[in-house]
Amino acid sequence: MSEKHRFMTLGRHIDEGEREHPEATGDFSGLLSDLAIAVKMIWREVSKAGLIEILGATDRQNDCGDEVKKLDEFANETIYRAMDHGGHLCVMASEESHGLISIPDKYPKGKYVLVYDPIDGSSNIDANVSIGSIFGIYRRITESGPGTEADCLQPGYKLAASAYVIYGSSTIFVYCTGDGVHGFTLDPSVGEFLLSHENMRIPDRGKTYSVNEGNYGKWADGMRSYVNYLKGTDGSGRRPYSSRYIGSLVADFHRNLLHGGIFMYPGDSTNPDGKLRLVYECAPLAHIVEHAGGKASDGIRRILDIVPKAVHQRTPFFIGSGEDVSEAEEFIQGRRNH
């Protein structure tokens, strides 16, 4: 780690970004700082998950029909409690909550909106596999008072910031405010996120693909053709691709962001809209990948251009290296079959 990185904390990086905008009020920086505190609190519980009663499932399902894990519930509540009183937000929305999450009446209402998936891949924690969190931040479009559904249902290109966290062998916080994508690794000895990945850029093409091939029999012909193509060989040595599927969106995405490749969760005959949620999973990661030089699509459209109609709306999802995603679109759209 260079001397610059050794002393560049997440907080300092946020503050330096604010100084580049003389009109800034400090609200945005305060919001990101509160978010970092929530992440540290979640990390603390994740790091000792096998020693405390936080493994396993609760007895309920969320609005998306997924079984709620104890860690999902804890993380959802932790983020809410860390973010509800700072005066930066007017409303929140989460995978684990029914409808919108209001800011309590006793607290001031701010000019930003937070959408989030508190724990991505929580089914993996019992097996000690990497999990994560995903965040998107919008500027409100209503003028004042409590935030509304309209504030949350904005297309991804309007995101003011996006972030994800991986809780793995190390805990990494990656965020983007429109000025590059930067990663910070938590140093537990000092309790700070330190700059470890500056100006992250995804390769134009990778050598790996990530998809749940257990659904192969339910895919459309174009999707099956594309995966068969990736497994084939060619004279250039570019194929075959290697299959790497963790089953944790954030972990799969992070690997591909560093090394190139494509993550896919297509629609199928059972779930035409796929499994992943547009508002708080796909749009924030699409925002990050585009600012890192990559691409995100539903197979037809740019993810960031889709105007959501519901907080828990699902979408097919193809994200990663630009050339790989463009190639996938050709197969999905029937413009190519080999």
Image (tube, rainbow, N blue to C red):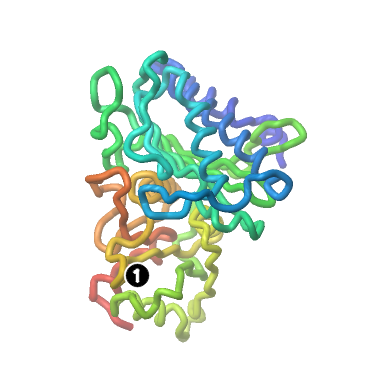
Q: Is residue 24 above or below residue 297?
A: above
| Left or right for 26, reference 47 | left
- The quarter of the image holding the N terminus is top right
Find residue 97 and report its horizontal and vertical position in percent: 40, 40
Secondary structure found at label 1: helix
Residue 217 appears in view: yes
Say which of 96 and 192 sits in front: 96
Say which of 178 and 246 sits in front: 246
Say which of 211 and 75 sits in front: 75
| Left or right for 217, reference 205 | left
Q: Residue furthest front?
A: 59
Q: Residue furthest right?
A: 189
Find residue 308 and report its horizontal and vertical position in percent: 25, 46
Residue 223 location, quadrant: bottom left
Give the mark count: 1
Looking at the image, which residue is at 49% across and 42% down? Answer: 118
Looking at the image, which residue is at 48% across and 23% down? Answer: 29
Residue 144 location, quadrant: top left
Going by the numbered disc 1, the residue's amino acid type is Glu
Say which of 180 and 244 sits in front: 244
Find residue 105 and report its horizontal and vertical position in percent: 37, 16
Find residue 184 and report its horizontal and vertical position in percent: 61, 39
Residue 160 appears in view: no
- The quarter of the image holding the C terminus is bottom left
Looking at the image, which residue is at 49% across and 59% down? Answer: 203
Label 1: how many Cα within 10 Å (few below 14, some 14–19, many 20+): some
Looking at the image, which residue is at 45% across and 74% down? Answer: 213
Residue tagged 1: 327
